[in-house]
Image (cartoon, rainbow, N blue to C red):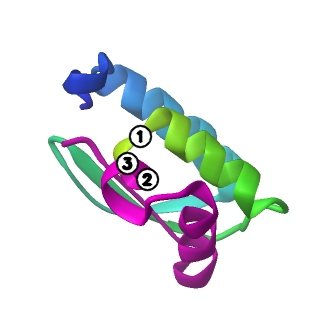
Amino acid sequence: DAINYDKDHEAVMARYRQWEKQYDLKLIGAGQDWMEAEIRSPPADWLAFANEAYAFCPDLVDQGTNDVASLASEMERTQVLYLWWD
C-alpha cells in the first residue's frame, strides 16, 4: 500500500495489473509498502513510462534518482520496475 499517498492496496494492485498487461511485468517481490517487477515487454518510450511511475510513486524520484530522466535510464538498464512508498 501507499497510505502516505492515499493509495490503498487495491489502488496499487489496480495500477500493477494495468502495467502488467502493458509491459508483461513479472512480479519479483513485494511487501507492505514496496514491490519489484521484471519488465519483460519494454515500453517504446522509457521517459513516458518513468513519468507515469513517478506520478504514481513520487518517492522513486524524490528520494531516489532525483530526476525522471535518470529513473527512465535506470529502468531501461535494469529492466526492473521498483516501487516503494516511504
Residue at label 1?
58
Magenta run includes residue 64: yes
- Secondary structure under tag 2 reads helix
Q: Say what amino acid the circle numbered 3 marks.
A: Asp
* Residue that appears at 33% across and 21% down: 7
Q: Say what amino acid the circle numbered 2 marks.
A: Val
- Secondary structure under tag 3 reads helix
Category of crowding for the residue at label 2, using alpha-carbon neighbours closer than 10 angstroms: few (below 14), some (14–19), many (at least 20): some
Q: Which one is nearer the viewer's eye here, 33 or 73?
A: 73
Q: Which one is nearer the viewer's eye here, 2 or 36?
A: 2
Query: For this view, does 55 lie left or right of residue 58?
Result: right
Can you give x and y, in whole percent of width and height, for residue 4 in the image? 21, 24
* Residue that appears at 35% across and 61% down: 64
Q: Which one is nearer the viewer's eye here, 19 or 72?
A: 72
Residue at label 2?
61
Q: Are marks 3 and 2 in contact (CB under 8 Å)?
A: yes
Category of crowding for the residue at label 3, using alpha-carbon neighbours closer than 10 angstroms: few (below 14), some (14–19), many (at least 20): few
Query: For this view, does 46 lie left or right of residue 69?
Result: right
Q: Quadrant of residue 57?
A: top left
Q: Are marks 3 and 1 in contact (CB under 8 Å)?
A: yes
Q: Going by the picture, which residue comes out furthest to the front?
A: 66
Position of the N terminus, as image quadrant, is top left
Gap between marks 2 and 1 measured at Cα: 6 Å
Magenta run includes residue 57: no
Category of crowding for the residue at label 1, using alpha-carbon neighbours closer than 10 angstroms: few (below 14), some (14–19), many (at least 20): some
* Residue that appears at 35% across and 22% down: 10
Q: Say what amino acid the circle numbered 1 marks.
A: Pro
Instruction: Say if 15 sits above or below 22 in the image.
Output: above
Query: For this view, does 84 lie left or right of residue 70?
Result: left
Residue at label 3?
62
